[in-house]
């Protein structure tokens, strides 16, 4: 069910102000969107990933509820934070798995595929490392990738959260995809350097 953004915003702000009953009313309203967001993440993971979509939603919910003094500005800000939490959960899981297997069988990320089509088998660790490097150089561009690619926010929603124009978001998005592609190609074995530049 599509809810008026102002209704979600009001409940988020009430929750920020310490009204716990607002959280109880909010969760059923945003659960479907959180599940869609988690499904988007899981579609990029290996098909045999142990973590399921519902488990990712539940873990993100638990982490968000434990967040103290959250100051939610609006619906877009909340979902941007949710995407960050989900990304962190998956990256932590992937790092843990790679430390156990030392990278055996991990498919290198092909950014063109991943960004354009959300291909299964996304190397979350490689993307997280590259995104962290991008954010160190230009925090806003890193946030744009986080919100657009991971959070599934529209250009307009991303612009609203970052308090910038949609045109700026599009420029940042285009630059960030190119920059990340270049960084990830550097990390890929020579046989996997087949990315297109379009």
Image (cartoon, rainbow, N blue to C red):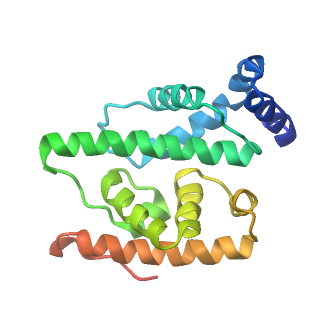
Q: Residue furthest bottom?
A: 197
Name the spot of residue 117 as percent of width and height, x first.
Answer: 47, 60
How many marks overall? 0
Name the spot of residue 4 as percent of width and height, x first.
Answer: 85, 39
Name the spot of residue 19 as percent of width and height, x first.
Answer: 77, 21
What residue do we see at 31% from left, 61% from top? Answer: 109
Q: Residue furthest front?
A: 69
Q: Quadrant of residue 165?
A: bottom right
Relative to 105, residue 165 above or below: below
Q: Nearer the viewer, residue 197 or 77?
A: 77
Relative to 99, residue 21 above or below: above
What residue do we see at 62% from left, 48% from top? Answer: 80
Q: Nearer the viewer, residue 110 or 60?
A: 60
Name the spot of residue 100 as percent of width and height, x first.
Answer: 15, 39
Q: In the rendered view of the protein, which quadrant contains the N terminus?
A: top right
Q: Quadrant of residue 18?
A: top right
Is residue 73 toward the left or the right of residue 190 in the image?
A: right
Is residue 80 toward the left or the right of residue 134 in the image?
A: right
What residue do we see at 58% from left, 32% from top? Answer: 67
Q: Nearer the viewer, residue 36 or 161?
A: 161
Relative to 67, residue 76 above or below: below
What residue do we see at 64% from left, 29% from top? Answer: 31
């Amino acid at each position: 069910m599509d809810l008026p953004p102002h209704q979600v915003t009001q409940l988020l702000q009430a929750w920020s102000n310490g009204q716990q009953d607002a959280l109880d009313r909010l969760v059923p309203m945003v659960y479907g969107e959180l599940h869609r967001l988690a499904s988007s993440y899981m579609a990029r993971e290996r098909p045999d990933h142990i973590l399921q979509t519902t488990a990712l939603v539940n873990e993100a919910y638990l982490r968000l509820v434990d967040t103290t003094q959250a100051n939610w500005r609006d619906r877009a800000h909340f979902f941007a934070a949710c995407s960050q939490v989900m990304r962190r959960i998956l990256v932590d899981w992937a790092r843990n798995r790679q430390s156990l297997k030392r990278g055996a069988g991990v498919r290198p990320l092909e950014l063109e595929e991943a960004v354009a089509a959300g291909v299964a088998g996304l190397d979350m660790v490689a993307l997280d490392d590259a995104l962290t490097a991008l954010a160190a150089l230009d925090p806003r561009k890193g946030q744009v990738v986080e919100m657009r690619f991971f959070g599934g926010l529209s250009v307009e929603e991303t612009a609203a959260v970052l308090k910038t124009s949609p045109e700026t978001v599009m420029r940042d998005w285009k630059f960030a995809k190119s920059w990340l592609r270049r960084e990830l190609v550097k990390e890929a074995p020579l046989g996997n350097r087949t990315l297109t530049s379009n």
